[in-house]
Image: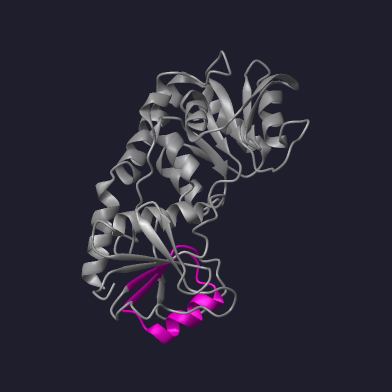
Amino acid sequence: MSEPGTVVVGCHWHDRSRELSYVARAVAGAASRCGPVAVLVPGRVGARQPDGAFDLEAIGEGHRLQWPEHLGPGQLVVADELCAPVATMLSAVRPRAVFTLSGDGEGRLSAARPLRLVPETGAEDEPSVEVHVAVNRLAQRHRHHGFGFTGYQLVLSDRSGRHDDPPPAAESIGGAFPDDDVVVVEDAVAWAWRGRVLRGMVPVDTRMDLWRLVAHANACVDLAPGRQIARECVEALRFGTPIVVPAGAGPAAAHAAAGGGASFGDHGELVSAVARLRDPDNRSTASAAGQRYADAHYGDPARPVADLRRLLATT
């Protein structure tokens, strides 16, 4: 890619368990509509691997990364995470602009700027890309085949592995509303509880399984939302399902505030938030507000393309 374009440095490109991979792929896809795109990943220098729309190019491993010689000057670089080896490599390359998707890396590069992924009041002039978060509307037509009921309180767990009891947050909801079904998604399984009684369990094998569970919930309580865009929260809002998230959860808390949901600091606040959304009028108002917000910012596949074009034109 000798002509100026976009280079995505994806140290976590292959880690599908992290939201960072999802966002990096979304940004690369949008950038491909604007001009040439190269995707650089860890691996044996020069090795290439097809991955959907892209041919991934390996730039080394560990602390020694090597910028490909065929990439000409003037590239706009988007790094998923500015780790020290990436910062060292880019400091020698001197691209025209460097943006990062995560603030977790320990690398230092004075020219690097964060790429804003979530709407923020007063930050409209900062560089931003609001990625498209796709959902399948068919999920709203039919509930998950494993359960014969809807209108449950859905809890996306923050635990890993198998457990005999629901998470404490789900127990609090079940204890406060003993007639409500509480469905907990944990370790790729949906567990349906009423109080402390397990009503059933079904596997969550596909994204469509999760979407169906989200679309037919009264509220979605996400105990471990993603740190970049809180993808599952955005998906819930696009289905019109209000969200309840931990206070200080970054993007998720911003979505909740803008989309009619709620944040909680302790289990008492969690129960109060769920109680408010059990009221049909409150739930309807929150549902409409959340769907408007999520569709406006994450529902248009042309929006991130326009964001990238603007970024390429102004840097």
- Viewport quadrant of the N terminus: bottom left
Q: Does residue 246 sit above or below 250 in this rendering?
A: above
For residue 85: magenta? yes
- Residue drawn at x 26%, y 76% as measured from the top left: 2
Left or right of 119 in this view: 89:
right
Which residue is most to the bottom?
92
Residue 219 at x, y percent in the picture: 52, 29
- The picture quadrant where one finds residue 160 is top right
Which residue is most to the top?
148
Q: How many numbered discs?
A: 0
Q: Does residue 171 sit above or below 229 in this rendering?
A: above
Residue stretch in magenta: 76-102
Which residue is most to the right?
164
Whether residue 126 is visible here, answered yes or no, is no
For residue 255: magenta? no
Q: Does residue 212 sit above or below 235 in this rendering?
A: above
Q: Residue 286 or 39: which is nearer the viewer?
A: 39
Left or right of 34 in this view: 175:
right
- Viewport quadrant of the C terminus: bottom left
Left or right of 1 in this view: 228:
right
Residue 265 at x, y percent in the picture: 62, 45
The colour scheme of the drawn protein is one colour
- Residue drawn at x 36%, y 30% as measured from the top left: 288
- The picture quadrant where one finds residue 308 is bottom left
Residue 296 at x, y percent in the picture: 30, 42
Residue 12 at x, y percent in the picture: 52, 61
Q: Residue 293 or 138: which is nearer the viewer?
A: 138
- Residue drawn at x 52%, y 74% as measured from the top left: 60
Whether residue 216 is visible here, answered yes or no, is yes
